[in-house]
Amino acid sequence: MHTSLKLTAVATLAALSSLAMAQEQVVKIGHVGPLSGAIAHLGKDNEYGARLAVEELNAKGVSIGGKKVKFELVADDDAADPKQGTAAAQKLVDAKVSGVVGHLNSGTTIPASKIYSDAGIPQISPSATNPKYTRQGFKTTFRLVADDVQLGSLLGRYAVKDLKGKSIAVIDDRTAYGQGVAEEFEKAVKAAGGNLIGHEFTTDKATDFMPILTTLKGKKPDIVFFGGMDAVGGPMLKQMKSLGINAKFMGGDGICTTELIKLAGDALVDGQVVCAEAGGVDGNLKKGMDDFGVKFKKRFNDDVKLYAPYVYDAVNVMVDAMQRAKSSDPAKYLPELAKTTGYKGVTGTISFDAKGDIKNGALTLYTYKGGKRDAIAVVR
């Protein structure tokens, strides 16, 4: 080939390549969770779920409104702290993300939701369970799990009806999540005719529970309910054991993790802990969740801790709405996101109600046996 023709061909290829890149639109999806602090293991689990979804979408090659898109994950750390959570939210708004998956905790999700709402950016929380989140009148808030009203109510009924609790004590960590789930638990215990013998308070940073546990020991509880996270629940179980408190230990999804096994050590007696996790699959959906676990382990060399599958589904639901709207512009795809009905995810069928809550959200009851988490039942 003549040199000038060669150069022309190279120039044409370069022009076509840059044109293809110009046509490939970058769509930013934000993710926020605690990547530092006591529950960083749960935040990392969430981020991995988002990363896996984005990597798969990019490998598959997705078009929105006839244009090829490349998804970019913009991840930030809120350290489970409300102030840091709002700062992270503002950073994502400034970065012009098309949507946000997060935050993990109710205490960070709720204040951040106002910032996303003001900017008109859709937000799907994979794990915040405080009812207030979707009851603020914002059109941008969605959640993929059952809320604390369902979770606390289930556990309260179970404590009285199934565990036959006669003396039920409550401890909460004063966070939006811990306080919320403890209050719903108490309401359900009272409604079921149960006997509440005391309510003590701690924080999500505390390590010494001896004073409150000593107070409760004198009242001889047969069930202790804790509203809080595994990082506090594990050490609390150890201190209960050292004081000779042999009560059943109950809690919500915050303690219902595989990490609790390490955090509680030999204080985790078979069948002593009964907890509920928002979400859960049974029957023919179980295989999809198991397959996800295998894929996740292969990619990150780590097991799913808790909410990674919900984050993975949240990213995919968001992208599905963009494809239906033929646009990644938040104002254009938000109405489609709200209309999501019957989306088949790893975590089950996803449909949103008028508030943005998942319809017919599942809850799974668990206990621990032989150093492993053991499902009791999936209820809706």
Image (spheres, grey):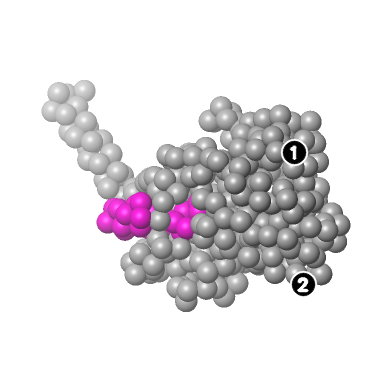
Q: Are there few (<14), some (14-19), or many (20+) residues within 10 Å of tag 2?
A: few
The disc at residue 58 is none
* Residue drawn 51% across the image and 44% down it: 206
Of the pair 20 and 375, the residue shown nearer to us: 375
Judge whether residue 328 is colored magenta: no
Q: Is residue 251 depicted above or below 342 in this figure?
A: above
Horizontal arrangement in the rendering, residue 109 relative to residue 211 (left or right) = left
Q: Dot 1: what SS?
A: loop
The disc at residue 191 is 2
Of the pair 6 and 192, the residue shown nearer to us: 192
- The residues colored magenta run 83-109
Label 1 to label 2, Cα distance in Å?
A: 30 Å
Sequence-wise, the earlier of marks 1 and 2 is 2
Q: Is residue 143 depicted above or below 258 in this figure?
A: below
The residue that disc 1 covers is 244
Kind of residue at badge 1: Gly
* Residue drawn 60% across the image and 72% down it: 353
* Residue drawn 45% across the image and 63% down it: 110
Position in image of residue 2 (x %, y %): 16, 24
